[in-house]
């Protein structure tokens, strides 16, 4: 496939026949032809499966309707609601084509996520499903990523400005696999990494190594309960200050609080106690990230959900918050575009200070 074959300024769905979703559904990505020198490489989110028990609860209607259990991870790329938004043009935020988005003329690759492994896996996990049947979950996120990168290099061989970004599960992916993306474009010196909403304290080492079977450069970097910090440290050890490192999160992120609660005691809920625990952990994380490099900036926010809940909004760059909300007078888009011209500063850190 050649760059010229893509329609100008339109999203094009592309199926990758050698790639797969968690349970063998066809895998696709979305590509938008804009300026061939400027590329946004976006990693989609969609939950996670971290052991044989969580594998029982895919994000399909049957999980909730039959077993009254929340779906924990997306399993069909082509039916992810975000994909519908792209195809209908309803998408807002960083991926939009509106004049409000300073990146609207960039080329974009939207990497779909339906493997439950934060884009890092190479494994076939055998497990017992909720109905008692024996099944295989394809944790092939990293394998899919390599196929996506091969196509991306063919389409955009002369990238001069690169933004690797993702939200939720895709934000973990930014920390884990940005090195692979940078290696695909070794001549590109202008690189920004944007991690939107990723923090779940847990002993992830066995999951990354044995369940997902991530490659060594990803698995060996996990040394603590916060593998986002571990992965960013490993990135900096290899790439130094070549990229700008950006991290954003709500001070009491409602989705991350809920998943953290589930990891602790199996209850998929949020409450004030866990929100405060999360806020404290986020404050510690910001300090650890800032210690990695002077080119690390953070944006902490308290954007409310449409419906009241103890926590605040999960993810802010691929929706209306991108241009429509501000923290201490700074919108997410202002913070990002300033960072991309090396005006690096922090926003909202007071929210996680004791």
Image (cartoon, helix red, strand yellow):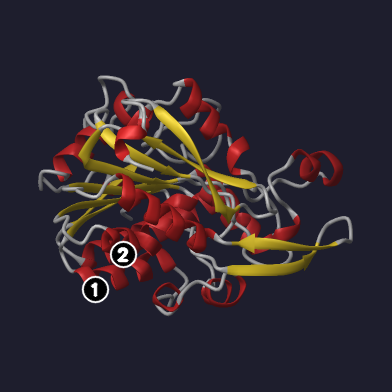
**Number of marks in picture:** 2
Residue 43 can be seen in this image: yes
Residue sitting at 14 percent across and 48 percent down? 344
Asked whether the beta carbons under mark 2 and mark 1 sit within 8 Å of each other, the answer is yes
Which quadrant is the C terminus positioned in? bottom left
Q: Residue at x 32, y 24 (%)?
A: 97
Query: Above or below — where is 162 with respect to 327?
Result: below
Q: Earlier in the sequence, mark 2 or mark 1?
A: 2
- Toward which corner of the image does residue 320 lie, by quadrant? top left
Question: Which of 84 and 166 lies nearest the eye of the viewer?
Answer: 84
Query: Badge 1 is on which residue?
Result: 238
Residue at disc 2, secondary structure = helix
Q: Residues within 10 Å of mark 2 (few under 14, many from 20)?
A: many
Q: Quadrant of the N terminus?
A: top left
* Residue for badge 2: 179
- In the visual, does 122 lie left or right of 325? right
Percent across and percent down for residue 203 are: 54, 73
């Amino acid at each position: 496939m050649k760059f010229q074959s893509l329609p100008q300024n339109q999203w094009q769905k592309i199926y990758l026949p050698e790639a797969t979703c968690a349970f063998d559904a066809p895998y696709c990505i979305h590509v938008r032809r804009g300026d061939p020198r400027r590329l946004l490489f976006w990693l989609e989110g969609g939950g996670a499966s971290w052991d044989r028990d969580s594998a029982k609860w895919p994000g399909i209607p049957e999980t909730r309707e039959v077993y009254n259990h929340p779906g924990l991870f997306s399993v069909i790329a082509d039916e992810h609601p975000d994909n519908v938004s792209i195809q209908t043009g309803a998408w807002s935020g960083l991926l939009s084509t509106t004049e409000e988005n300073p990146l609207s003329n960039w080329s974009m690759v939207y990497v779909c996520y339906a493997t439950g492994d934060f884009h890092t896996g190479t494994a076939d996990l055998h497990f017992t499903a909720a109905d008692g049947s024996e099944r295989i979950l394809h944790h092939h996120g990293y394998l899919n990523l390599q196929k996506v990168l091969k196509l991306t290099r063919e389409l955009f061989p002369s990238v001069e400005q690169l933004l690797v970004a993702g939200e939720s599960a895709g934000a973990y992916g930014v920390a884990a696999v940005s090195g692979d993306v940078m290696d695909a474009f070794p001549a590109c010196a202008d690189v920004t990494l944007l991690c939107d909403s990723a923090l779940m304290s847990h002993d992830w080492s066995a999951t990354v190594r044995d369940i997902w079977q991530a490659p060594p450069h990803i698995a060996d970097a996990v040394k603590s309960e916060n593998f986002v910090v571990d992965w960013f440290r490993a990135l900096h050890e290899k790439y130094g200050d070549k990229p700008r490192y950006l991290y954003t999160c709500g001070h009491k992120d409602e989705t991350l609080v809920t998943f953290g609660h589930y990891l602790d005691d199996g209850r998929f809920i949020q409450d004030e106690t866990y929100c405060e625990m999360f806020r404290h952990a986020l404050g510690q994380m910001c300090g650890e990230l800032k210690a990695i490099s002077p080119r690390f900036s953070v944006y902490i926010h308290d954007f409310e959900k449409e419906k009241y809940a103890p926590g605040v909004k999960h993810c802010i760059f691929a929706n209306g918050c991108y241009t429509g909300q501000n923290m201490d007078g700074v919108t997410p888009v202002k913070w990002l575009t300033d960072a991309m011209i090396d005006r690096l500063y922090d926003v909202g850190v007071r929210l996680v200070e004791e």
